[in-house]
Amino acid sequence: MALVLNDEQTMLRDNARGFLGKNAPIAHLRALRDKRDADGFSRALWKDFVEMGWAGILVPQEYGGLGLGHVEAGVVMEELGRTLTPSPFLSTAVLAATAIARAGTDQQKKNYLSQIVAGDLIAALAVDETAKHNPEKTAMTAARAGNSFKLGGAKTFVIDGHVANLLIVIARSAGKPGDTNGLTLFLVDASARGIRAERTPTVDTHNAARFTFEDVNVSADNVLGRIDAGWDVLAGVLNVGRAAVAAEMVGAGEEAFSRTVAYLRERKQFGRPIGEFQALQHRAAHLYCELEVTRSAVLKALQTLDDSFDRAGAIVSVAKARAGLSATLAVNEAVQMHGGIGMTDEFDIGLFMKRVRVGQELFGDANFHADRLARLNRY
Amino acid sequence: MDNLETFRKDTHAWLEANCPPEMRRPVQGEEDACWGGRHPVFQSDAQRLWLERMAEKGWTVPEWPREYGGGGLTREEAKILRQELRALGCRPPLTSFGISMLGPALLKYGSEEQKREYLPKITRGEIRWCQGYSEPGAGSDLASLQARAEDKGDQFLVNGSKIWTSYADKADWIFCLVRTDPNAPKHEGISFLLFDMESAGVSTKPIILISGASPFCETFFDDVLVPKANLVGKLNKGWDVAKYLLTHERDMIGGMGSTSENRSLGQIASDTVGTDNGMLADTVLRGQIAAYEIDTLAFRLTMDRVGDMAKLGQAHPAVSSLLKYYGTELNKRRMELVMSAGGSDALEWEGERSHEGRTARAWLRSKGNSIEGGTSEIQLNIIAKRILGLPGA
């Protein structure tokens, strides 16, 4: 497959860019932040997403979704990265839809996927338990009790956790932290007894939460996939999440870069545009190369998820690592090259830096994925 | 489509019958390649036969017009030929600056007589060419070159010197940039001239690099007479020809150094560095190698993506500068990691154990990749100006 978007994907990109540019530019993020919006995202905007079919972008058509692929989801994520728009798209349309579509029973799929498509359900994936992403070390316990389980432990950095109706939780039903066997995925009602959610505003004004689970009762009917065999499903969902976040960072990094190049052309000091100074020209040219090289890896990862899902692990790690590093370079250079004004809250460029830092930590940063790739290559 | 299938079948059959088994192994270094020339030195009968057979079909230059000795193949057919060559492991029958650099320039700027005179000999590997561009005083600022060609009626009189002329001591002819109008602005006084290296007044001196012997030479012109018919393109308009030729050279260098090594660098490093619990024992080196492999894979995908975009007319004309810059810097990084992984064993300079210092020499030679064919700094200038539209001279 050629490493370019096809005509439909290009059209989706242009539509998404136009829609978000008009309805959710950076000012939208600022407004949510400055009025300390309790939801942290606009339900009205989410309704627009739902009407355009984006909530069901990955949901198979038989459940009412658009039945599109990971490249299309990545196209939307990239445009969301460009405008820094907070929304449940990642948590619900990408992560939850993937988990349920791939591992759900017919009943679970019929129930939850249709609600996702209709915009009636917000779901959050609860994986991390420590400051650094390390899913193999999952310690939250799932103790068997008759025909149900009792969940006990804590989760952190749960994206859209505090507004979710449904939590998709990975917990340990057997083995010890470090084992990939013995993990089980659960579909948990967010309002179940024993769950405490603490919203954790993060640097980028997107939504995250910490959870504690104390003897939370979950029926065996709400196991997603097979007991003790949740790792493969989780690994697939995490790969999709990583590629999606990588796409978002491509958008954020490139938007920060293009604003910076525009600034280099306009800003005059010493009687000339600062873009004439060779030091800045070379750094901008180098950054251009890094962003283009990253774009190739991210598109390849999304395409591989579409046509070889189970063999996408390595390329997804390459994409996530690259996206984190090049977007980080982009936002660091962006603030630096804007000089003093780049350091002001009033100016938008700092908002990109904030989002990219969060994107790095989501589902494993560049270091995590470099390590993962080395393990896959057996060194 | 039926015709293409037939072509594939016929091509496969012909290659199977005509490519000697010794020619189905990859070329090992520049000495192993077939360079042809007026006084060719073939490594084997197989090498000579392979060249002759492919040249006869015009398949040393599959897409050049038949009338000049090319194969006259369409794009699709040429792609099929490449695939079939790769499938059988056939090495290129001829390595030639005539094919990779001069030929395309002649096809675009040469007169009909020049095309008929030079192109067939290029396709048959009968003339070996070298490139006379850089001078001691004109490297990055190539247009400031000083080698002089004075008008002497029906001939030019050439004086001056060139440097970094690859294989000048083995070449038969040279394509050379010379100054024909010292009074014009520097880009507007340059001409593109072809002449015989056996002409009176031409001499060469090999250049030894920090990595040891090299194909590079200094070339000296002492009152060399060149027929005016050997001028390619218009007088004083040679810079256009040079620029056109440089883009082909850049593509050639950017693709170099991309190894087809099957084992990852990390696994190769394990041989000398050792492992702890299955992981490379030097943990910092392990991280550096993983980062390099991430960048290398992403870069290879970028070469593919640029190719795909080019086919759709979507690639920026200056994107070759990205590929050249990034590819060469990656190659230098690789050699640094190889040296680090190789430890003191990689420091050996002579003897069989180290294959005469092969690794150390390759490491040193790689430093030239970011200098030759337009330095990394020049490539960044090009990207900044032509792709990003940043202002200034």
Image (cartoon, rainbow, N blue to C red):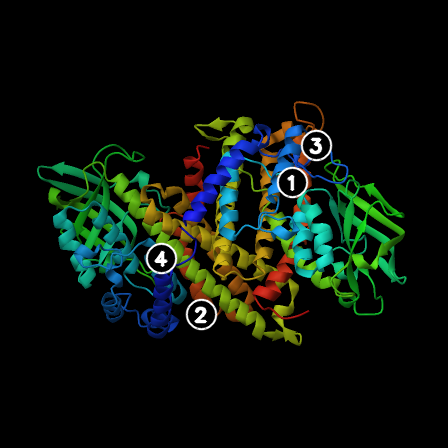
Q: Which of the labelled discs sits on residue B42, or is there none?
A: 3
| Amino acid residing under circle 1 | Leu
Decide if residue A288 is on the left or right side of residue A243. Answer: right
Label 4: few (<14), some or many (≥20) within 10 Å? many
| Amino acid residing under circle 3 | Phe
**Of discs 4 and 1, which sits in the foreground?**
1
Chain to which the residue tagged by mark 2 belongs: A
Residue A140: image location, x then y, percent = 24, 41
Decide if residue A181 is on the left or right side of residue B92. Answer: left
Q: Nearer the viewer, residue B183 or B370?
A: B183
Labels 2 and 1 share a subunit: no
**Of discs 2 and 1, which sits in the foreground?**
1
Residue A186: image location, x then y, percent = 19, 45
Residue matched to label 1: B94
Asked if the residue at tag 1 contacts the one at tag 2, i.e. Cβ–Cβ closer than 8 Å, the answer is: no
Residue A60: image location, x then y, percent = 22, 54
Q: How many marks?
A: 4
Q: Which of the labelled discs sits on residue A74, or is there none?
A: 4
- Between the C-alphas of marks 4 and 1, the distance is 45 Å
Label 2: few (<14), some or many (≥20) within 10 Å? some
Q: Nearer the viewer, residue A263 or B81?
A: B81
| Amino acid residing under circle 2 | Asp
Decide if residue A109 is on the left or right side of residue B31. Answer: left
Chain to which the residue tagged by mark 3 belongs: B
Asked if the residue at tag 3 contacts the one at tag 2, i.e. Cβ–Cβ closer than 8 Å, the answer is: no
Q: Is residue B286 visible?
A: no
